C-alpha cells in the first residue's frame, strides 16, 4: 500500500506495486520539483507524487500532470527514469544495464523441482546488511578453507554439518562456463567418499549446500550478494522447499543476527562469523596489503574471473553469466550438491 525506498548499485530508487499488481522501480526524485516518490500515493496505474500529483507508470511514462493545460505535450516529451524488472521466486530482480543488451533471466534447474515451493528471503535472515564492499562478501563464499577455522575452531561449530569439522581430504577449485565451483571431499568411516560442491555463478550468486549428514542431494538454494553501494551489501536468497517440509534456518542464515543467542559486541568478538570477518577487512579491502598464499586459490580464481569479466564488458562483449539463448535460460543446469560415492 506504500512505496519503498531502496538503494542498489549506488542509486537511490523507489519500488512499488500499483493497484493493478504491476511493479515499478523508478528514480526516487520526481522530475517536476524533486520530491521523493517514497511519499507518493499508489495509484490504479503507477504512482502519484505527493507534491503536485504527477502520476508515473511502472515504465516511467508520465500518465497525468494535474494543473497543466489540457493541450500540454509534456507527457509526450518527458519520461521518468525507470528500470525493467522481473519477478520470480518471491524476489523482484532489476536489470540496470543498457536496454539494447538486456539478457535472458536464468531459471535454475533446482527451482523447478516437482512438488516444491520457492520461498524468498532478504536482509537480516541471510546475513545482511554487511557494511563493506560486495566483493568481500562474494569472494568469502569461494574461500572454502575459512569454514574450518572461522566457523569451527575459532567461533565454535556454526554450521549444522560435520563436513566442516576438520580440513578436507581433498579440495579442488574449478572454473566453469558460468563462473567457478569448489569440491570438498572427505573420506567416511565406512570407506566411502563424501563430496560437497559449492558453485558461484557470475557475478553475484552462489549455490550453497548444507546437509547435516553424508547423503546425496541436490542444491536447494541460491544466495545473492547484492551491492547497495561501494561500502554496503545485502543478502538475498531463493530456496526450493519440498512439500510438507518445515522451513528452518540453515547455513549462513543461522549466523545472521536473528539466529544468534547473544547480540552484544563482546559476543561477536568471541564468536565472529562472515560478517565480522569481511567487515574487519575495512569498507573496501586493500588488496595491495594482502599476502595471498596457496590456500587462497579460490579467492585468486574468483578475482581473475572478475577481472576478465570487466575486460569483456569494456570491449563490448558479454562476460560469464550472461545468457542470450532463451531455450537454455529456461533450464540452467547447476552442479552444486552433496554426493556420497564409493
Image: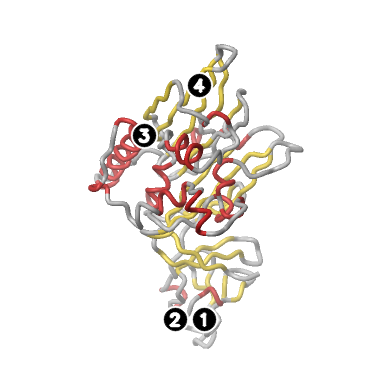
Q: Earlier in the sequence, mark 1 or mark 3?
A: 1
Circle 2 sits on which residue? Answer: 32
Mark 3 against mark 4, which lies toward the viewer?
4
Where does the image place residue 72, in percent across and percent down from the top left?
A: 46, 82
Kindly check if marks 1 and 2 are in contact, taking CB atoms under 8 A apart as contact. yes
Q: Is residue 228 above or below residue 110?
A: below
Q: Residues within 10 Å of mark 1 (few under 14, many from 20)?
A: some
- Residue at 27 percent across and 47 percent down: it is 287
- Whether residue 303 sits left or right of residue 77 in the image: it is left
SS class, disc 3: helix
Q: Earlier in the sequence, mark 3 or mark 4?
A: 4
Mark 1 against mark 2, which lies toward the viewer?
2
Distance from disc 4 to disc 2, alpha carbons, whole Å, reads 62 Å
Circle 1 sits on which residue? Answer: 65
Kindly check if marks 3 and 4 are in contact, taking CB atoms under 8 A apart as contact. no
Q: Nearer the viewer, residue 65 or 172?
A: 172
SS class, disc 1: loop
- The residue furthest right is 244
Tell me, what colour scheme is on the image? Answer: secondary structure
Distance from disc 1 to disc 3, alpha carbons, whole Å, reads 54 Å
Where does the image place residue 180, in percent across and percent down from the top left?
A: 40, 33
Q: Earlier in the sequence, mark 2 or mark 3?
A: 2
Q: Residues within 10 Å of mark 3 (few under 14, many from 20)?
A: many
Kindly check if marks 4 and 1 are in contact, taking CB atoms under 8 A apart as contact. no
Distance from disc 4 to disc 1, alpha carbons, whole Å, reads 66 Å
Mark 1 against mark 3, which lies toward the viewer?
3
Q: Is residue 36 above or below residue 19?
A: below
In the rendered image, is residue 324 in sight? no
Circle 3 sits on which residue? Answer: 298
Circle 4 sits on which residue? Answer: 186
In the rendered image, is residue 111 in sight? yes
SS class, disc 4: strand
Amino acid at each position: 500500500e506504500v512505496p519503498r525506498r531502496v538503494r542498489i548499485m549506488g542509486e537511490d530508487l523507489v519500488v512499488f506495486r500499483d493497484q493493478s499488481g504491476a511493479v515499478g522501480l523508478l528514480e526516487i526524485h520526481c522530475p517536476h520539483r524533486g520530491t521523493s516518490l517514497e511519499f507518493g500515493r499508489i495509484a490504479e496505474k503507477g504512482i502519484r507524487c505527493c507534491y503536485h500529483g504527477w502520476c508515473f507508470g511502472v515504465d516511467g511514462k508520465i500518465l497525468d500532470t494535474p494543473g497543466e493545460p489540457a493541450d500540454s505535450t509534456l507527457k509526450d516529451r518527458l519520461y521518468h527514469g525507470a528500470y525493467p524488472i522481473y519477478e520470480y521466486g518471491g524476489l523482484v530482480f532489476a536489470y540496470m544495464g543498457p536496454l539494447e543488451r538486456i539478457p535472458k533471466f536464468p531459471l535454475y534447474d533446482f527451482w523447478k523441482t516437482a512438488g516444491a515451493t520457492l520461498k524468498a528471503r532478504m536482509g537480516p535472515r541471510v546475513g545482511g546488511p554487511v557494511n563493506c564492499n560486495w566483493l568481500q562478501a562474494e569472494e568469502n563464499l569461494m574461500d572454502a578453507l575459512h569454514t574450518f577455522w572461522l566457523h569451527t575452531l575459532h567461533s565454535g561449530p556454526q554450521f549444522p554439518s560435520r563436513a566442516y569439522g576438520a580440513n578436507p581430504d581433498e579440495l579442488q577449485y574449478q572454473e566453469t562456463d558460468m563462473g567457478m565451483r569448489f569440491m570438498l571431499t572427505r573420506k567416511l568411516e565406512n570407506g566411502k567418499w563424501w563430496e560437497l560442491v559449492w558453485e558461484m555463478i557470475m557475478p553475484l550468486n552462489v549455490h550453497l549446500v548444507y546437509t547435516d549428514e553424508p547423503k546425496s542431494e541436490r542444491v536447494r538454494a541460491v544466495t545473492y550478494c547484492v551491492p547497495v553501494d561501494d561500502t554496503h551489501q545485502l543478502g538475498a536468497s531463493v530456496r526450493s522447499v519440498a512439500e510438507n517440509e518445515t522451513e528452518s534456518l540453515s547455513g549462513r542464515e543461522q549466523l545472521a543476527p536473528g539466529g544468534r543467542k547473544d547480540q552484544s559486541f563482546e559476543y561477536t568478538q568471541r564468536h565472529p562469523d562472515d560478517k565480522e570477518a569481511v567487515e574487519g577487512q575495512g569498507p573496501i579491502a586493500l588488496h595491495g596489503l594482502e599476502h595471498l598464499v596457496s590456500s587462497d586459490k579460490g579467492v585468486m580464481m574468483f578475482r581473475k574471473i572478475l577481472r576478465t569479466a570487466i575486460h569483456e564488458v569494456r570491449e563490448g562483449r558479454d562476460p560469464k553469466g550472461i545468457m542470450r539463448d532463451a531455450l537454455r535460460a529456461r533450464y540452467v543446469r547447476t552442479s552444486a550438491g552433496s554426493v556420497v560415492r564409493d
